[in-house]
Each structure stands twice: as C-alpha cells, then as structure tokens.
Image: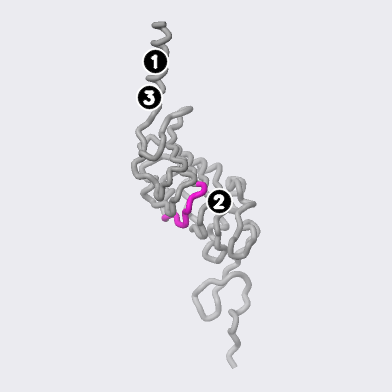
C-alpha cells in the first residue's frame, strides 16, 4: 500500500507540474512538449493580455472577439492559433509580424471583409495551414494584393475552394481583379478599360 500511495503521489506531482499559470478564463497545460492555452467558449470579447510567455498554442474559438491587435501576441512565440467562430472584422497591421514559428492559423467563421496582402508575411516561411472561409470578403480592387497572396499560398490555404466573395457571390480563387483608374478620378475600378458610366468624349 505504501508503494502504491507513493506512486500515486509521484504521479500527481508530475501532473501538477504540467499545469501552467494561465488567464482566469483559460486552461493552460503542457502536453507532448507543447504548452497550450485553451480558452474555448469563455465568452471573451478580446484576446487575454496575461498569457504566460511559454505558451506556444492558443485556442480562442467560439468567442466574441472583434479585433486582433499587434500587442495581443507580441510577447509570445506561437506555432498554433485557433480563432474560429469569433466576430473578428479587423486585424491590426503587424499583428503577426513576429510569429515566424507559426505553423497553423485558423480564421474561418469571422467577419473579415478585407486584409492587406502582407498581413501574414512574417510567418510565410513556417506556415503550413491557414483557414479563411466563412468570412464576408469584399472582393474589390482594395483586396487584390490579399487575393493574390491567397492564390500564391496554394494548398497552405486549406479551405481555399470555400472562400467566397460576399459582394459578388463567387469563389475568391476564381476572381481576376484587373484594376484600372476610373476616368477623371484617382480611384481604382474593377476590370476592363472602358470609361466610367456617364463619361463621354468632349465635343
């Protein structure tokens, strides 16, 4: 009995050592040499600011998060981030610039309509999976650099065939955004070289 009790105590001590200090709404633990913060369904409206620096994987799915800011992950070296089914409509420029170890990033099921083409440039070399579907993408000239980035990344975008342009109800990968300047303006217009409606030659 003594040996059994000692073995049990040793096991409990080992397990307790795997539990990491964590934001109140999350559970942080180490498993298979990866330290994960799981905050699923915690009703969060923003990314917690007190993740311990050893966190490598963050699960923030099914929250009410609306924005990702540059400061949110700046102190972490992440390999995996799950932001599925939030309300994210904006990702601040530079939010992922330091994440050069990121392998998987999941962003489907949000409210993203626009992202700049270089938003994920800091993790291009390490990234092996990213998801972007079920967002209301607005496929206008402004989105052209990001559309090209999605096409260039190929199979890394795991749901590429399911990314839909909400404004034209067409698959994003089939869009050819040929942008020219509208006559008499400095604003880009979609496709073609015909003059803007109402424009006529001078008499």
Q: Which residue is mark 3?
A: 17
Q: Cα distance, mark 3 to mark 2?
A: 36 Å
Q: 180 or 131, which is in the foreground?
A: 131
Q: Cα distance, mark 3 to mark 1?
A: 11 Å
Q: For marks 3 and 2, give the one nearer the viewer.
A: 3
Which of the two discs, 3 and 2, labels the residue nearer the N terminus?
A: 3
Q: Residue at x 64, y 61 (%)?
A: 170
Residue 173 position (above or below residue 189): above
Residue 88 position (above or below residue 29): below
Q: Residue at x 51, y 57 (%)?
A: 112
- Residue 21 location, quadrant: top left
Q: Residue at x 49, y 57 (%)?
A: 115
Q: Position of residue 105 (x, y in %)?
A: 51, 44
Q: Which residue is mark 1?
A: 10
Quadrant of image for the N terminus: top left
Q: 108 or 200, which is in the foreground?
A: 108
Q: Residue at x 48, y 40 (%)?
A: 80
Which of the two discs, 3 and 1, labels the residue nearer the N terminus?
A: 1
Q: 195 or 38, which is in the foreground?
A: 38
Q: Cα distance, mark 1 to mark 2?
A: 45 Å
Q: Position of residue 49 (x, y in %)?
A: 35, 44
Q: Which residue is mark 2?
A: 132
SS assignment for the magenta stretch, majority = loop
Q: Is 22 contained in the magenta span?
A: no
First to last magenta residue range = 84-92
Q: Position of residue 150 (x, y in %)?
A: 57, 53
Q: For marks 1 and 2, give the one nearer the viewer.
A: 1
Which label sits on residue 195? none
Pointers 3 and 1 in contact (C-beta within 8 Å): no
Q: Is 86 contained in the magenta span?
A: yes
Count residues near mark 1 (Cα–Cα under 10 Å), then give few for <14, some for 14-19, many for 20+. few
């Amino acid at each position: 009995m003594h040996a059994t009790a000692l073995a049990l105590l040793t096991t409990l001590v080992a397990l307790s050592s795997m539990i990491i200090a964590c934001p109140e709404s999350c559970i942080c633990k180490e498993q298979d040499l990866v330290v994960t913060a799981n905050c699923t369904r915690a009703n969060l409206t923003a990314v917690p600011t007190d993740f311990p620096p050893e966190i490598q994987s963050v699960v923030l799915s099914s929250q009410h998060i609306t924005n990702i800011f540059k400061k949110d992950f700046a102190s972490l070296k992440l390999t995996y981030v799950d932001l599925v089914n939030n309300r994210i409509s904006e990702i601040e420029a530079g939010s992922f610039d330091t994440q050069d170890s990121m392998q998987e990033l999941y962003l489907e099921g949000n409210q993203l309509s626009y992202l700049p083409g270089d938003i994920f440039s800091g993790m291009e070399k390490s990234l092996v999976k990213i998801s972007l579907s079920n967002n209301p993408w607005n496929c206008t000239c402004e989105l052209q650099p990001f559309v090209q980035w999605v096409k260039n990344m190929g199979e890394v975008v795991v749901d590429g065939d399911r990314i839909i342009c909400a404004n034209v109800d067409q698959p994003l990968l089939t869009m050819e955004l040929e942008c020219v300047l509208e006559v008499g303006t400095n604003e880009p217009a979609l496709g073609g070289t015909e003059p803007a409606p109402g424009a006529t030659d001078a008499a």
